[in-house]
Image: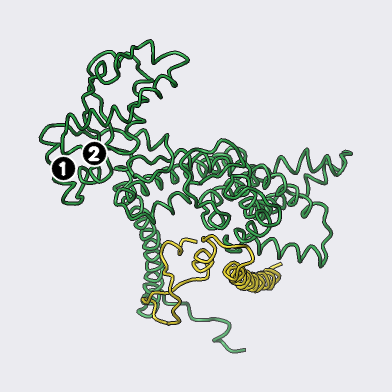
Chain colours: A green, B yellow
Amino acid sequence: MSNAIMEPTPTDWNGQIMQKRIAGRYAAERRFKAMGFLAVALSTLFLAFLLFTMMGQGLRGFQRTEIAVDFDFPALTSGATAASISGPNADAALNSMDIPGIVELAVSEQYGELSEGLLTTGAAGNARQMLLDNPSLVTAKQQLWLPVDSRLDVAFKRDGEPAAEQTVAALAQKDALRTGFNWTFLTGADATDPSAVGIWAAFKGSLMTMAITLMLAFPVGILAALYLEEYAAKNKLTDIIEVSINNLAAVPSIIFGLLGLAVFLTMFGMPRSSALVGGLTLALMTMPVIVIAGRNAVKSVPPSIRDAALGIGASPVQVVFHHVLPLALPGILTGTIIGMARALGETAPLLMIGMRAFIPAAPEGFTEATTALPVQIYLWSDEVNQGFVEKTSAAIIVLLIFLLGMNALAIYLRNRFETRW
Amino acid sequence: MIVVMAAGYTANLTANPFATITTVTVQIVALLTGDQDFGSPHTLAAFALGLALFVTTFFLNYVALRAVKKYREAYE
């Protein structure tokens, strides 16, 4: 037996070779750490850049430029009183007053040659609403602040066309312009004039579409997940089903739009661009996501809980509904909310089923023509008018806040109800 | 879908990443957002493009699932 094997020479850790190797290992560790940090920093930078651009552009979208208009109401309305335009007949009385004509008259009297195209298309409606809210305005001379046309709006906020800049300069000299909060943007619907557009119709359309999606995808998804995990035999058929579900979850969303077009619109003749068809199409897209999340959640419930429940005499249905489902629910809910958030931001399938029409009013029912938030953003981003740039960003901010809320809810639910074994 | 906003509409077979190109999704959107009959060649072409997209993703998914199955078994 040789001595070399029995008594190996101890490693000389302080020697030059070993010191070099140790230094190399530490350097590799530092390099890896730096690379990871760089990746995180880069993605944070992109996110910050996105938010910064959105905020910079979009916050202006929540503001509007207003102009002071003097109304000599007693003369203009030929003796309307506060009593005649309030109460149950207020709407009819205001309609008979020809408010657009009154506004036009007042503006042309005050601003003369500048008055051409001064106000936005919705200005008369704003004036009407002011009178409805406060009928006593009509009894005296009043100064009302009305939103200006989008060309002037753009010129006042930043650089616009030269002609609009000149008008704005002339008006600013008279101290007639101010910046106000754009309530119309939160309460209105789509319009041709960017300073009269609003997001409410699209928001409501999105909510209605999501409601249909949730009602359909959630129960079907949960039941499918439970059946596949708890009851289905493991054979060729369930393998095919598994591949299909995974495939459906990964298919480009536009395919679901084609499906919706072919099946719901053409075969079943459902109403075009309605929240019903949009919801059904998005439900098809969300269901596989819920099934996959649900299966993982059901799988992670330990078998010992099932065995214990069966051992004390629970039936298989009781085991599933009393024990497995409650324990798996946080995971399922998280998956559902993330799936819904994805559906909320989806444009392509909705474009396919005709939800890109110009809809100037909020939908009243599920079968009416509707628009949705992301589609509205897509449509506005295509507009030529400069005023739409900031409206697009503002709509994106609304959508981002909505999504952030949903994801926060998902995280809260997960932390609140998650059980660990 | 995001490419509908970014990519162009002209078909262009090139390897140059800076050249204007189009994608299948863009073409489907472009074909289907007009006012045609359901049986028109435009609509049918869009469905053919959709089928091509579906088959491609199905194949990729199948490969992915096979890979996952193969390597997962090695650890169990």
Crowding near the residue tagged with mark 2, few <14, some 14–19, many ≥20 C-alpha atoms within 10 Å: many
Quarter location, residue A182 = top left
- In the image, A245 versus A149, the foreground residue is A149
A156 relative to A345 in the view: left or right: left
B25 relative to B69 in the view: left or right: left
In space, the residues marked 2 and 1 are separated at their CA atoms by 9 Å
Q: Which residue is mark 2?
A: A118
Q: Looking at numbered disc 2 in the image, what kind of residue is underneath it?
A: Leu
Q: Looking at numbered disc 1 in the image, what kind of residue is underneath it?
A: Thr
- Judged from this view, the residue extending furthest toward the bottom is A2
Question: Taking B13 as reference, is A375 above or below it?
Answer: above
- Check if mark 2's residue and mark 1's residue have beta carbons within 8 Å: yes
Residue A294 visible in the displayed image: yes
Residue at horizontal 44 percent and vertical 79 percent from the top? B12
- In the image, A344 versus A109, the foreground residue is A109
Mark 2 or mark 1, earlier in chain: 2
Give x and y (percent) for residue A28: 40, 71
Q: Name the secondary structure under disc 1.
A: helix
Q: Which residue is mark 1?
A: A167
Question: Taking A394 as reference, is B8 above or below it?
Answer: below
A215 relative to A400 in the view: left or right: right
Give x and y (percent) for residue A175: 13, 31
Quarter location, residue A411 = top right
A122 relative to A300 in the view: left or right: left
Give x and y (percent) for residue B67: 65, 73
Quarter location, residue A107 = top left
Question: Taking A329 as reference, is A126 above or below it?
Answer: above
